[in-house]
Image (cartoon, rainbow, N blue to C red):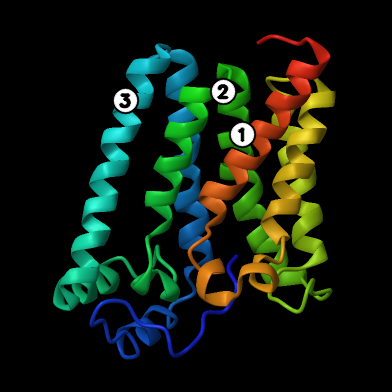
Amino acid sequence: MKEERDGDETIAHLDDTHFSAELTKPDTGILRTLYHGFGLVIPTIYLTLVTDRILFSGILLAIFLGFFTADILRFIWPAWNKLITRTLKGFIKSDEATRFNGSTYYFLSATLVIFFLPPYIAATAIFMLSVGDPIACLVGRRFGTIKLFGGEKSLQGFLALFIFAFAVGLILLPWQLSIIGAFAAAVVEVFPFHLIVGKKLARWLDDNATIPITSGWAMTGVAVLAGWSG
């Protein structure tokens, strides 16, 4: 769930007014929700198959660099950008035509939390994103009548993310850490960055990065202060 982007913004010779409109024709909410489910695979692999922190974060870094390079190529060559965005229009949002796509942010945040944070906290932070964010999106789109901070995000979406992130957190962590992580995730998801740094900068912030990084570090901080290890 992102703030509506400014119509006058472009990136390096990109004219996205034609094909970004095409991306909004199908309802991408369901497809993106299903795509979010893939995010559950990464922490599951980390906890069960590839448990070496250095090795797995290195693999994720390589994947991130692949997505990052592909995005840079999109910005340089408009024809390639149009081809990619049209082909994947069921999985990307219109504003991702002129910024990094959600997968780039996801693998960046996954790399950082897995490398720096305790395993169960890192995995939980990613689980909270993969479960809580798409559900918040669906709830917000269907029932989001109370808008927050003059934007598109809603109180109903905030509560949905908090509840489901908290439930997911209970699988691996004590309830005290789960509630901290869920609250941090829900707050950063609706935080009005556009009012602080402006829409031009805020559009480059993505839930796929802000949620796991914020919730993961919040839980880690509390765990350190409480003397909890895991």
How far is mark 2 from mark 3, CA to CA?
A: 15 Å
Q: Mark 1 points at which residue?
A: 125
Q: Name the residue under label 2.
A: 117
Q: From the viewer's perspective, is residue 157 above or below residue 67?
A: below
Q: Are the two marked residues, 2 and 3, in contact with CB atoms closer than 8 angstroms?
A: no
Sooner in the amino-acid sequence: mark 2 or mark 1: 2
Q: From the viewer's perspective, is residue 177 above or below residue 3?
A: above
Instruction: Look at 46% across and 24% down and name the residue there.
Output: 115
Q: Which of marks 2 and 1 is in front?
A: 2
Circle 2: element type: loop
Q: Are the two marked residues, 2 and 1, in contact with CB atoms closer than 8 angstroms?
A: yes
Q: Mark 3 points at which residue?
A: 58
In the drawing, does residue 212 fall left or right of residue 191? left
Residues packed near mark 1 inside 10 Å, few (<14), some (14 to 19) or many (20 plus): many
Q: Which mark is residue 221?
A: none
* Image position, residue 109 (x, y; %): 48, 40
Instruction: Look at 50% across and 44% down and name the residue there.
Output: 37
